[in-house]
Amino acid sequence: MRSLIPLTAALALAAPVAQAQSSVVIYGRLNVAVESVGSSRAPLSRSQMRETNNRSVLGFRGEEDLGDGWRALFQIEGSLALDTGVGELANRDTRVGLRTPWGTAFLGVWGTPYLLSTSGFDPYYPTTAGYMSLMGNGSGPTVTNTSNRSSFDRRQQNSLQFWTPDWQGLSLRLAVSPNEGAVGVAGSHPRLWSGALNYEAGPWTLSLAHEVHRDYQGPGLDDTGSKLGAAYRWGDWRFALALEQLRYETPAGRLSRDSAYASATWQLGRGSVKLGLTEAGRGRGPVGSTVGFIAAGPGTGAHQWTLGYDYALSPRSTLYAYASHIQNQSRAAYDFAINPLGVGPGEQPHVLALGLRHFF
């Protein structure tokens, strides 16, 4: 961390004198649903009714004009569980940083550029039916280099990020999470690098993302994720596609898996019909190798479909319903990434939900 001290000092000396008081905005998302969930594969068939929280949040954000195009920015965001009343103050996107004419730099807890590159392509992100069930190898809602060694869909603690300004629709986001705290496996020094190149112009949104996890599976063993995404708007329709390859270096050898996601959204007045399809290929590598939900060998693939309907009661309040089903092959145990059921190999988890979402 010593190398960051001269950079911090230089930024402090270069920043102009403050010109105005900071402004603060209170915001939130309240998202809760009643769900009928279950899994099927005799003799493991089971079902239940439950109330679930789909990552409700309460936050505070603001900025201070420092003059000459410089701004100090801050955000504190925490989780709310409407079904249980439990919550935390700053366990979600929380940061302090500077926005300058050359880009935005900040430190804190934040979604990686890899995660953010395609999360907006999924109309069910973040709910029980989100594509993180298969894409990204599960969800890491607020994690460190050592608390979660498998997920590439992660909100990373101890994160330093830099975002370039848009240039003719192009922008670049970079993040690093340095080695600190427990080193995990003896001799390893886990750390993370993440980057995404994004393009947005007219009806098109394109993204190319790559992330590296150093020493996550042991000393000298690096994991990588690569993802390509594209979305297109055509009248009342929006189509999106994402392709991903994950590679894990394990003591037994390399474990890899390909996956793909496609979605379509059709706007019908105040309502919208939404379809999401995800395919996870079987794991490739030494038989018996497993990292997170990914396992090597035959019978380790899965696919998921989700179909639903939203109806806007107002610009901020929406009623929604959806059905989702994960079809695991005989040795696969993919589960819902948010509000999981705890399934075993070959089980087929499914959910039918009716919910209400409100922004303020």
Image (cartoon, rainbow, N blue to C red):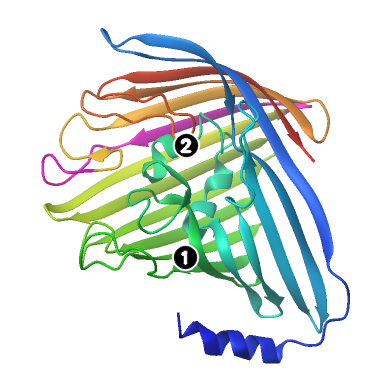
Task: Give the residues in magenta.
Answer: 268-290
Q: Confirm or deny contact between disc 2 and disc 1 (CB under 8 A).
A: no
| Residue 237 vs residue 22, the one in the foreground | 22
The answer to whether 15 is drawn above or below residue 186 in the figure is below
Locate the N terminus by quadrant. bottom left
The answer to whether 157 is drawn above or below residue 285 in the figure is below
Disc 1 residue type (three-letter): Gly
x then y, percent, for residue 115 = 49, 52
Q: Which residue is most to the right?
A: 20
Label 2 environment density (alpha carbons within 10 Å; few <14, some 14–19, many ≥20): many
In the displayed structure, does residue 274 sit left or right of residue 326? Answer: right
The residue labelled by disc 1 is 195
Q: Is residue 276 magenta?
A: yes
- Give the quadrant of residue 200: bottom right
The structure residue drawn at horizontal position 26% and vertical position 7%, both measured from the top left corner, is 43
Locate the C terminus by quadrant. top right
- Give the quadrant of residue 211: bottom left
In the displayed structure, does residue 95 sit left or right of residue 214? Answer: right
**Number of numbered callouts drawn:** 2
Disc number placed over residue 339 in the picture, else none: none
The residue labelled by disc 2 is 131
Disc 2 residue type (three-letter): Tyr
The structure residue drawn at horizontal position 51% and vertical position 34%, both measured from the top left corner, is 130
Q: Is residue 84 magenta?
A: no
The structure residue drawn at horizontal position 28% and vertical position 37%, both measured from the top left corner, is 281
Q: Secondary structure at mark 1?
A: strand
